[in-house]
Every structure is written in structure tokens, then in C-alpha cells.
Image (cartoon, rainbow, N blue to C red):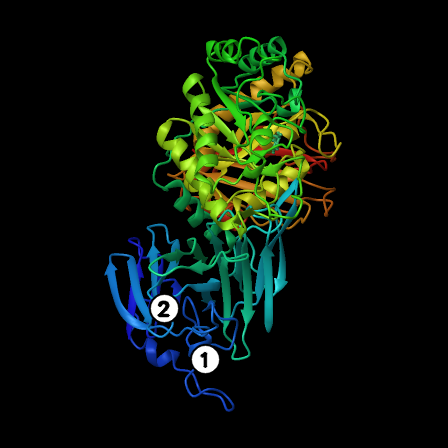
Amino acid sequence: MTLHELMTEDASRLLIVETRTGAPEIVHFGRAFAGGAGGLEALRERSVPNAALDVEAPATLLPEEGEGWPGLPGLTGRADDGSGWSPRVTFLDEERIDNRLVVRARDAVAGLLLTTEIELDPYGVLRCRASILNEGERDWVAERIALTVPVPHRFGTLRVPEGRWVHEFHHVDIPLRVGATEIANRRGRTSHDRPPTLFAGTNGFTNQTGEVWGLHLGWSGNAATRAEVLTDGRRVMQLGELFQGDEGRIAPATDLTTPWLYIAASDAGVDGVSQAFHRHLRARPGHTPPSGSRPIHLNTWEAVYFDHDLETLKALADRAAEVGAERYVLDDGWFHGRRHDRAGLGDWWVDETVWPNGLTPLIDHVTGLGLEFGIWVEPEMVNPDSDLFREHPEWAMQDPGHDPITGRNQLVLDLTRPEVFDRILGHLDRLLADHDVSYVKWDMNRDLTQAGSGARAAARAQTIANWRLIDELRVRHPTVTIESCSSGGGRADFGILERTDRVWTSDSNDALERQRIQSGFLRVFPPELMGAHVGPGQSHTSGRRHGLGFRATTAMFASFGIEWNLLDATDEERRQLAEIIEVHKRHRNLIHTGTVWQPDVADPAQQALLFVSADRTEALLSIAQLEIARYAVPSPIRLPGLVPDVRYRIEMQLLGDSRVGLAIAQPEWTRSGLTDISGAMLEAIGIQPPALDPESAIVIHLSAD
Ligand code: DGJ
């Protein structure tokens, strides 16, 4: 039995892992102890209750029934004849290199070799995964491989995802109590409603207070997240793939590896978890470092939908360039037969009726204006009304003998078949080789149902094949940036983000909805990955109307863009938009590289977002009033993350048509600014915001005096 201590270089996070039985067990994750971990074993010794097994099964990464685990096991499965149903691995060996630990364990009876990997990154994010090699002579079929993480006994609250289309990244808090809470996602994509993320913490945790752990599975397919409190008081989080049919089958001499599970721990609220996740994602290999130069988009979707017309699209590009956009993304509707959403998917060549001279005249026009050109694709899909489907109806995923179910009039292409993979890769490759395209919006607009390949369930293999398709395209076109979209934010996870650089956060451009959606997104992902566009005055998805100031103040703290037919905008609106874009450009380096805080607010109808520069000499704060203020006088907002003894100058900015609310008097600083205020005061006392109208927002700039 060994206790391994893995510590971040700045000594802020300590992970203690025990390798006692087969798989390792997380013993401690959080602050380092002054004086080391001596005596930990003695402190951890638990009594053995009556009517229990003589030895308590440890909460390893994959606790086993065979070990006596009283909860749902992490690893279950069996051979076809029913044997090997209760695996029990025993420790074999381990290798520790710096902050990476690899432990091997074997069940000679079931014929399984289990390898678990645990790594602690420099930002305090712990990630782990398991791999099962079948060393036997018969297939072994895994039913469930869920990585299991014990959280501190003092945790009483679970925060789980909730949402739907145009309402992504919402969460609800529920009590963590005896029994289990399971959230299963069977949509075959990360999903709008059940993405694989959980938070657990002490009761009443907030953005800045309480102990919280965040857990996230880097997987874009079916998955279950589960929290269980055992009657012996232990509480565990379990995250793993959901297998369908035979997906867990492991043939002799082959293995099955789980997705990575990511965990961050904070003793100062959710922000600590978010900041660790952001830093981890910012450092992921092979990606554009956050340079502060995330270009400003003009996306054509809500501007023209399928109504593609070269002259209109060129004029839109002119307007985009005038207001300061830097990337023009031609959305759905450009390819063969795609005049509406009932046809065309699969036929990835330019529609000759709408584009008699191809896309080049538009691309030349756009790049001539100095903008990058981006294009929309949905490579995983096929419409029954397409040349591809007419040629190869058998290429659609299905369960033979049952009629396939369509979603948005489309079926899913079976990318696990090499000929399908190659055909689609060939189309995409040619599209990028033949055109000056530097950006791809990769969409995916339906759930996977009956996701079969031949007679077998294949949602898992499809998820992997799709990742591989993106990877291969990236190898062939390494300078092209790819955005992950799935009817808005239906595919945002650490797995897809290994191969993409922006997320289309939601199809809602309604600023009010976006405030909440983006707050939820930022709990896990950093702002430069968060696509956010200024839409028209009336939202297409909700019918709500908002002024430009609120729309822009909401979209600018992100990877900013426009999704509005600027040909319909007034001169004054375009003038204001250009001004706002200038403000964004001035501050985007801070927004895209800074530390994100979501200051706790007293008014539940208010939301604050704070971006602090790396050297903490500058910060930007947005305060949004979502509904009528709860209190007649706004409560102060305390600002974390500044340098206590640096003195800041504070200025309020109203963007576009923004205004403060009605009051006999507003604090003087909102007009004249403030100087010489220490970071310590801002953290302890906070700033006193002006009264605000519902559905409005202000921006506050802070800089070292
Ligand atoms: C769904 C996406 O989320 C939208 O932004 C748009 O690209 C449409 N698909 C196009 O069909």
C-alpha cells in the first residue's frame, strides 16, 4: 500500500492517492497540509459497523462488487456465458513520473488488466481515466465503467445541469442525500440538457464561498453522471459513458479506454473551480494560445437564413467591414440542393443554381475587404433528399428492419464505415483546399437514435469516428480554426475542445437569455471559446426586444460577433455598433486572457461578471439587471481578485443606447469616476452600482492609478 502525494508547483493543490487494492483511491484533493501528510493513515481509520463486511471496500476509481462495494460498482460486465461478472482486480504495479501516476491491476479470473492513469496539471486540474485490456480468451462485455470519486463527507449540495435548446448551461442545486441521483444522457451528443458536468460542495456554496468540486467528463456522446451517498456516510460522484447494445464488448487482446474525467477543487466557491478549468483549457496542446486576437465575426445565419444571393451577401460583408468585423462566416445554405432544411446534407459541393460562379466571387470580396472567410458544414448528417442518400441509403445509421427516425429532416451518416468517412473527409478536404477558407463552423443538429452500424449499436464508435474526422481535417489543414456547434451549445465538452477552438454557445441571441446561458458556460469554459453575437433588436428565438446597449454589453465579454442583417440596421445603429466594436477591440486581450470572476450579488435579479488581467492591474466588470431590482437601492458588489494594496481608478461606461435607471440621484462616481481606491477596499466593501432598468447592463473599467 502506498500513498502518493502529487502537488502543483505553486503548492496550492495537493492530491493524495492511495494504491491499496487494485485501482487507486483519491484520499485528499485540495489544500496542501503544513507539515506534510504524516499520520494520515491513522486519521483515516474507520470503525467497522455491526452487520457489515469485516473489511470496508475502498472507494477506488472503479469500486467493485467483488471487493464488497455497497454502492453501484464502477466496473461491471461479464463474458457471454455469464462468467467474470464480478471482477476483482489486485494490484500489479505502478509508475510515478512527476505528477502522473499509472497503476496496473489484474483480475486473472475474469482475464482483465486494468490500467488507471491519474495526472495533476500545473493549474490544479486532476484528470484520470481507465483502460481495460481483455487478457482472456473470450469476449468480455463491459456494462458500465464509471470513474468514481469520493468527495468530502461535509459536502451536502449537488449542482446538476439543466437546460434545453436556447436555454443551455443552466444548473440547479439539489441536496446530496442518502440514495443516488443519476442524470443519463442518451442523445448521442453532449446535449443541451444533460452535459457531463457536476458540482458538489458544502451547503450554501456560492461563486466565492464554500468548498466546491467540479467534475467534467471529456466526452461528446452518451454518458451518465451520478452522485451517491452511502449509508456508511461516504459520498461518491460517478461519471462514465453509457453503453448501448454491445458497445462495451472487449474482444481478446483488445482494450477499451474511458474518456478523461476532469476534476477541480476550490475552497473559495465555484469561481476557483472555473478558473482552474479555464487555465487547463487555455493550455491544451495544439491550440491557438489565447492571444487576445479572437476576431470579430459576422455570421450570416439569422441575417439571411437560406436566402443566399451573392450581391446581398457582398453588401452584408461591406457593412460588416465598415463596423469593424474581422471574420465573415457563411452559414448553412451554400451547398448543393440546400434551399431549405429538408434537402442537401451530404452533397458538399457548391450549389450551382445559387452560385453559378462558385463561392470564389464572395470569398474574394470578403478577403478583399480584409476579413477572413469561414464556412458552415454539418458533416455527420445526410438528408434523405440528397444525391448521397439516393446513391447510398445504407450509409445512414439505422437499426436494420426498423424505419430510421429523422430529426430536422435528416439522418446520421455512419462515419464508422471507412468508405463513408473517406467520402466526407474528401469533400471537406476539397472544400478547404479549393477555397480560401480559414474557419469552419462544424454543426450537428440532431440526436442519435437507432445509431447502428450494421446490426450493432455504434453511437460510441460514431463519437470517436467524428473526433477522428475533425482530427484528420486538422492535420490536413492545420491553420483552419474549427467551431463546435450543435443546434447551439449541444456539444461543448473537453473532448470536442481538444480539436475545436470556439463553441457556438446557443442559438439564442436574446441578451436576457444569454446572460444566464453565458454565466453557466463560464462555470466550465473560458470566455474566448464562448461565441456570442449581437442579434437584431427583436430576438428571432424569443421575440423579445432589447436595445443595442444591452445586446452588445452581453455579447462583448466573449468571442464577439454579429448575427444581424446589417442591411436593415439604421445608420445610427451601425455607428453605435462600430463604437462598441472599438471598445471590445480595446479590451479583448483582457477579456480573452484574464481571470474570470462572477462576483456574488445580493440581488437575485442581477448578475455581475469580472475579468481581471493577468497582472491584476486592470479589470472590466459588467453588471446586468435581469429583472426589476429586488431592492429599491442596489446593494454593493464586492470585487474579488484585485491586488489589495494597488489603488484603482474606476470608470463607468454606457455602451450604445444603454442608460442607468430612474432614481432621484445616482452615486456621483457613476458620472465622474473614482480614483485611489484600493483592491482591498473593493474586495471588502465593494462598489455601489447605480439603479438599473430591468434588461439593461453597464460596464465598469478599473485600472491601476
Ligand atoms: C444550427 C446552428 O446552431 C445555427 O447557428 C445555424 O448554423 C443553423 N444550425 C443552420 O442550419
Question: Residue, x 48% and y 31% (percent of image)?
Answer: 424
Using a 10 Å C-alpha cutoff, classify the residue at mark 1 as few (fewer than 14 neighbours), some (14 to 19) or many (20 or more). some
The residue lying toward the viewer, choosing from 350 and 303, is 350
Compared with 612, 33 (above or below) is: below
Report the Cα–Cα distance between label 1 and label 2: 14 Å
Instruction: Inspect the image, locate mark 2, and give the three-letter code of the amino acid beneath it.
Output: Ala
Ligand 1's quadrant:
top right
Q: Give the image quarter of residue 283.
A: top left
Which residue is under mark 2?
23
Compared with 133, 516 (above or below) is: above
Total marks in image: 2
Residue 154, position as x, y percentages in the image: 51, 70
The answer to whether any part of residue 67 appears in the image is: yes
Instruction: Inspect the image, locate mark 1, and give the three-letter code of the amino acid beneath it.
Output: Gly
Using a 10 Å C-alpha cutoff, classify the residue at mark 2 as few (fewer than 14 neighbours), some (14 to 19) or many (20 or more). many
Q: Is residue 407 left or right of residue 276?
A: right
Label 1, ligand 1: CB separation under 8 Å: no
Question: Residue, x 63% and y 23% (percent of image)?
Answer: 338
Q: Give the image quarter of residue 426.
A: top left
Which residue is under mark 1?
68
The residue lying toward the viewer, choosing from 592 and 616, is 592
Q: Is residue 66 left or right of residue 488?
A: left
